[in-house]
Image (spheres, grey):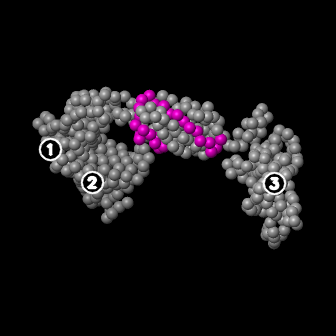
Amino acid sequence: GSTANNKTINNTIATPGGLTLASYSETDATARTITFQGTGDTTVTGAINQNGANALALTKSGAGTLTLGGTNIYTGTTSISVGKLFINGNQTSSTGAVSVSALATLGGTGTTGGNATIAATGKLEFNISTAPGTHDKLDLAAAKTLTFSGASTLTINSISGATTGDYTLLTAPGGISGVVPAALVLPSGWAATVTKENSNTDLVLHVTSVGSGDVVPPTLTSITDNVSGGPVNIGATITYTVTFNEDIDATSVTAADFNNNGTAGITVGAISETSPTSGVFTVAVTANSAGTLKLRIPTGAVIEDVALNDLVVPVEDDTTITVRTPYATWAAGYLPSDVSNPALNLDGDGLTNLQEYAFGTDPTVSFGGAITWTPGSPVGAVTQRGTPVVIEEGGSYFAVYGRRVDYATSGVTYTQQFSPRLSVWGNFATAPTVIATDGTIEAVKVPFPGLFDYGSGFEKATFFRMQVSQ
């Protein structure tokens, strides 16, 4: 969006990785401001350039994180009012002042070209993953200064690789003034202090302890399922047991940390740790469509041990489960006879394999009989499965057909069709009445419709047929 030709990029993408922009070049021949806002994380990998001598300013607002990775050339100010800004590229030519508002954050490993000011309650944040001598610090350009305007906070993140020693976090050749951050947010078990060194030009973190020394990421030991590798039907819920090699922060394990590296649609449900500190979790996964299921902890997932070391991802199950349609499960029950093709008629009795499935008849035995039943209260018993039949009761006609008791999840659609003269048919969604059952197939009854316009005026139906599809 834009306001008076100033530009705004509003990113609300919540997925891991957020939004990535290749570059930005201002085209207006006047001073402008570009604002990055929103809750999503944004990375600009290339350059941000102004148009000639027309100053471009940059403002960071919104709770998300903005990372600048390019060689930027703009001479306006850089203002961090909300959220985080990490400068990882070369901004030596971006000579405007850098200001960090209260509760906003500055960090990075690149170079900024202007003087920087941290407001009271403003923050600095750095990631440490190497030994002290190889840490990549944030630099201010030649003669530029850093000013702390009040009490501030320094946050240190570390996944692995850090040791005790002195880490130079930031260098300001023009000097660092004000009181260094009094509030330190450190990884679990760490002890450290921060000072100004080298004639007040370096901000240095003195790490005296990294706690227990656990800087090793957790690993996945195994993923097992409660269905012996399958296959399963659509709608089945599989309980996976996910085991790690050490205690895991249970709050870091969520449904968003799992997906399917297969073709079936899934829903990740309840997740729970089997016992405190066990590092063993159960994950309920429901298969929503046919295909394959291979549980994965994907790129972007954040699962941490209690020392805040992140699991290295992606990792996945070594078993692929086949998710079958209910029809495919039924067909497998007749092996070695092959009734896997629903359109074929293996036994030559006039019913396709799909119709045999829908009516509950045997696809390997030729049989042309109709469904029969004995009355009962409230329902009777199906005594023979078969094809639909028309009955008369009290001068009214009804169609009776066999329907699977699990019809709602069977993958089959039953379409009731009536006709006055066989050449035209109408679909009727009248809800049938269950009159008998054998536990798998139920006999259902639907009345013939009254007068209906099938395309040539109102006519009375005299024929019935059942269409099944999936």
Callout 2, which amino acid?
Ser
Residue 91, image x and y in percent?
A: 26, 44
* Front: mark 3 or 2: 3
* Residue visible at 25% across and 29% down in the picture: 209
Q: Which mark is drawn over residue 179?
A: 1
Distance Cα–Cα, label 1 vs label 2? 21 Å
* Residue visible at 81% across and 54% down in the picture: 376
Q: Which residue is mark 3?
A: 376
Residue 108, image x and y in percent?
A: 28, 41
Distance Cα–Cα, label 3 vs label 1? 89 Å
Residue 378, image x and y in percent?
A: 77, 56
Queried whether the magenta region covers residue 124, the answer comes back as no
* Front: mark 3 or 1: 3
Residue 265 position by quadrant: top right
Callout 1, which amino acid?
Val
> In the current view of this chain or complex, which residue is farthest to the bottom?
457
Residue 127 position by quadrant: top left
Q: Which residue is mark 2?
A: 81
> In the current view of this chain or complex, which residue is farthest to the left?
199
Q: Residues within 10 Å of mark 2 (few under 14, many from 20)?
A: many
